[in-house]
């Protein structure tokens, strides 16, 4: 070997002066030769190696469980799209691309079904109204005082075609403190008497309200004591109508009205001073148009003429006043009818009935002192109220019992007119009888 080979000197065929491996024959087939040519295939001696022993098959590696919405994502949140078929922003199946920032694997849902929502809302509202109505019914029914037993009334007239109510305003001081009695000018007398009495006939031909003056001259018939059960034979004794109530309560009053009119009473309703004033105050007062001013120290009345709103105290004074008028009892019944018209017209309005903040106080004030017969339901009570509202509102007949004169200071009924009036009501005929 020449020394120049070791020192890398230039040789023939080595234009770049690089490392050659031509075997000394100058053909330049090694690396770094600018005249390099591909090395031809060499014939190699076949060496057969022994086959390695087979390895035991291992179970495939367990993949961590990934929720469906996260499959195909890396830990950094990148979604390759291959698991869902979503490549380059196109979902599998050619659907719409989800909005930016949302879950790309979640497709938008269908639009809201407003008809279904409105239907469900209506059903819920109806159930709520029914529940409130049922609850109110049982609440009101539990407060009604069914204390009058009409089965104790004897020798009753035959039933007619109309439903008749005897409506009584009593001077009961029940529930009133000494200060309230003084304020309302009720006095402090024990017991109770009738301050007003009316017969309301609810008929198909039209409703009729007949005021019965407390000074009416009537006969006390045979009756059975409501407490003792003892029979008291009639002696032809004549008294003022309100004396019957003072003598043996509602049962004898019903018996006396039926005996002197020949008209059967189907239901009885009575309200005291406290309940009457409470209803007016719960309504926020009742508006009245008083034609002529008047004063009465006995009732506490002191009114000027004109339209004004009466509170409970003033309303009670208005309906109780009698000494300020020449025809004391008849003028008072006229005022009572006028006030009931205004009261019913204001109470039976949607603004009161549909407003729980008004109807509950009104019902609570009235029901606390309301006394009815044992067979009177809330439905009967409602029919009575709306029949009275219709009459006092002008959709019926409102009148005093026809009077023909007086006897010993008591007002004597016109027997012929009373007979025809009762016959028309009993047969459900239009009332044509007048009080004058």
Image (spheres, helix red, strand yellow):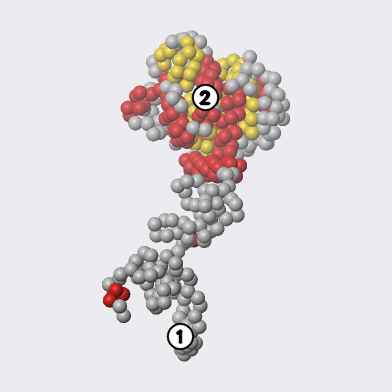
Q: Residue at (47%, 40%) from the top-left corner?
A: 143
Provide residue 134's location: percent of width, then percent of height: 53, 44
Residue situated in front as seen by the camera: 393 or 152: 393
Residue situated in front as seen by the camera: 277 or 73: 73
Q: Is residue 393 above or below residue 73?
A: above
What is the crowding at mark 2: few (fewer than 14 residues within 10 Å), some, or many (at least 20)?
Answer: some
Report if residue 277 is visible in the image. Answer: no
Q: Which mark is residue 290?
A: none
**Which secondary structure lies at badge 1?**
loop
Q: Quarter of the image holding residue 414?
A: top right
Q: Residue at (60%, 29%) from the top-left corner?
A: 387
Report if residue 23 is visible in the image. Answer: yes
Q: Which residue is mark 1?
A: 55
* For marks 1 and 2 on the same chain, the one whose residue lies earlier in the sequence: 1
Provide residue 94's location: percent of width, then percent of height: 60, 52
Q: Nearer the viewer, mark 1 or mark 2?
A: 1
Q: Is residue 12 above or below residue 396?
A: below
Provide residue 55's location: percent of width, then percent of height: 45, 85
Q: Which residue is mark 2?
A: 346
Image-based side of 317 in relation to 209, left or right: left
Residue situated in front as seen by the camera: 182 or 52: 52
- Image quadrant occupied by the N terminus: bottom left
**Which secondary structure lies at badge 2?**
helix
Q: Is residue 238 above or below residue 160?
A: above
- Image quadrant occupied by the C terminus: top right
Q: Residue at (30%, 71%) from the top-left corner?
A: 8
State how far apart marks 1 and 2 are (Cα): 101 Å
Q: Residue at (43%, 13%) from the top-left corner?
A: 303
């Amino acid at each position: 070997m020449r020394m120049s080979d070791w020192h890398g000197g230039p040789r023939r065929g080595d234009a770049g002066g690089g490392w050659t491996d031509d075997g000394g024959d100058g053909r330049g087939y090694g690396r770094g030769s600018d005249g390099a040519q591909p090395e031809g295939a060499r014939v190699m001696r076949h060496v057969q190696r022994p086959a390695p022993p087979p390895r035991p098959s291992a179970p495939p590696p367990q993949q961590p469980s990934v929720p469906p919405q996260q499959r195909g994502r890396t830990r950094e949140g990148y979604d390759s799209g291959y698991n869902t078929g979503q490549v380059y922003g196109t979902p599998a199946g050619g659907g719409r691309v989800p909005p930016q920032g949302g879950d790309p694997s979640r497709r938008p849902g269908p639009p809201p079904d407003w008809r279904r929502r409105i239907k469900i809302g209506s059903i819920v509202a109806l159930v709520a109204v029914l529940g409130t109505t049922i609850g109110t019914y049982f609440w009101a029914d539990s407060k009604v005082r069914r204390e009058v037993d009409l089965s104790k009334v004897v020798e009753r007239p035959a039933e007619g075609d109309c439903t008749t109510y005897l409506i009584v305003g009593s001077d009961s001081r029940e529930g009133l403190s000494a200060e309230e009695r003084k304020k309302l000018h009720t006095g402090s007398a024990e017991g109770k008497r009738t301050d007003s009495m009316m017969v309301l006939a609810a008929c198909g031909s039209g409703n009729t309200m007949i005021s019965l003056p407390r000074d009416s001259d009537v006969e006390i018939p045979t009756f059975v004591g409501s407490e003792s059960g003892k029979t008291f034979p009639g002696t032809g004794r004549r008294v003022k109508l309100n004396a019957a109530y003072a003598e043996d309560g509602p049962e004898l009053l019903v018996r006396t009205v039926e005996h002197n009119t020949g008209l059967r009473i189907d239901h009885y309703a009575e309200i005291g001073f406290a309940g009457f004033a409470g209803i007016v105050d719960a309504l926020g007062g009742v508006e009245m148009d008083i034609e002529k001013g008047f004063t009465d120290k006995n009732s506490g009345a002191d009114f000027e003429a004109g339209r004004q709103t009466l509170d409970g105290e003033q309303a009670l004074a208005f309906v109780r006043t009698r000494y300020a008028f020449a025809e004391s009892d008849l003028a008072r019944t006229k005022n009572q009818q006028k006030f009931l018209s205004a009261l019913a017209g204001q109470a039976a309005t949607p603004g009161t009935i549909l407003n729980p903040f008004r109807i509950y106080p009104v019902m609570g004030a009235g029901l606390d002192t309301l006394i009815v017969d044992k067979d009177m339901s809330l439905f009967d009570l409602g029919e009575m109220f709306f029949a009275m509202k219709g009459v006092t509102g002008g959709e019926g007949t409102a009148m005093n019992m026809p009077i023909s004169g007086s006897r010993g200071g008591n007002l004597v009924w016109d027997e012929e007119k009373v007979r025809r009036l009762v016959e028309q009501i009993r047969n459900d005929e239009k009332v044509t009888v007048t009080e004058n």
